[in-house]
Image: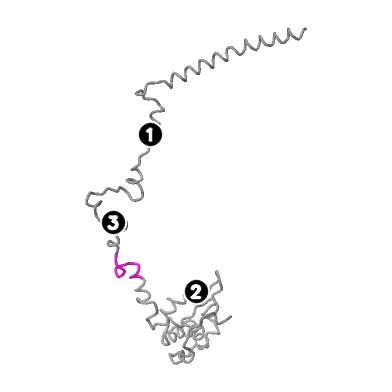
Amino acid sequence: MDNAIVKKTIRENTTSKMLPVMLLSVMSGAVVMGCSQQADDVETVASIQEADLAPDYQASRNTGSWGGVYMSRDELKAPKINVVDDSSLPSMAQDASLSKWEAKFEGTNAFVTTDGKKLYHDSCAGCHMHEGQGAYGAGYYPPLANNSKMQSKYYIIDILINGFRGMPSFHMMMDDEQMAAVTQYVVSDLNGFTDTVTAADVAKLRHANPPGHDPSE
């Protein structure tokens, strides 16, 4: 068959098939254009959605974290103040949490009691446990109960005054009588040794200046 005839046949077939597709596209475009040419006062799905999305510039002011904020003319004219009215806050003396703290630690930055058991449970039991059994965790906290080293009261006093490894010094937190009391508790109550510990024993080892570094280094 001649090439010219083949090309003509293909062109005619393609044109006849494309015509319905072109007509359908034109009709669809007309429908879309007709929908978009609605009058401005006619409510459509698109107009309802646009209305819902209209910004409410007062929303964050009236429903935000501060709640509704409405000020009278007098308030607007008043001098500027802090956003938080600290006059409504309780005084330190009325703070319930502080009252509990003061009841436990007797209201000062240092220890007041001379009760060896209370001193131990307030300052030592957090690491060495309430029964003196010691603990393993982020570090090693040696047992103070059933420990032969505790037979030497001067060993305990020296550590209380100077600290040891991870243990802090109590040089500035306990006086001689208090150190003697907590040492006596460790010696007698936790270990059953009979030696007596006195404030004079502590005075023998106490020095003028607290340690500025870990004495074990």
Q: What residue is rendered at 36% in x and 45% in y? A: 60
Name the mark nearer the viewer: 1 or 2. 1
What is the distance, in whole Å, between disc 1 and disc 2 at their CAs? 61 Å
From the top left corner, tell me how far across and down residue 79 is, in percent: 26, 56
Callout 1 amino acid: Asp
Question: Where are the magenta residues, as a range?
Answer: 90-100
> In this rendering, is residue 181 above or below 92?
below
The residue beneath circle 3 is 80
Q: Which mark is residue 127?
A: 2
Image quarter of residue 197: bottom left
* Viewer-proximal residue among 211 and 70: 70
* Viewer-proximal residue among 88 and 37: 37
Is residue 183 found inside the magenta-colored segment of the image?
no
Nearest to N terminus: mark 1 or mark 2: 1
What is the distance, in whole Å, between disc 2 and disc 3 at their CAs? 50 Å
From the top left corner, tell me how far across and down residue 123 is, in percent: 44, 77
Q: Residue furthest left?
A: 74
The residue beneath circle 1 is 52
Q: Residues within 10 Å of mark 2 (few under 14, many from 20)?
A: many
Callout 2 amino acid: Cys
Quarter of the image where the N terminus is located:
top right
Name the mark nearer the viewer: 3 or 1. 3
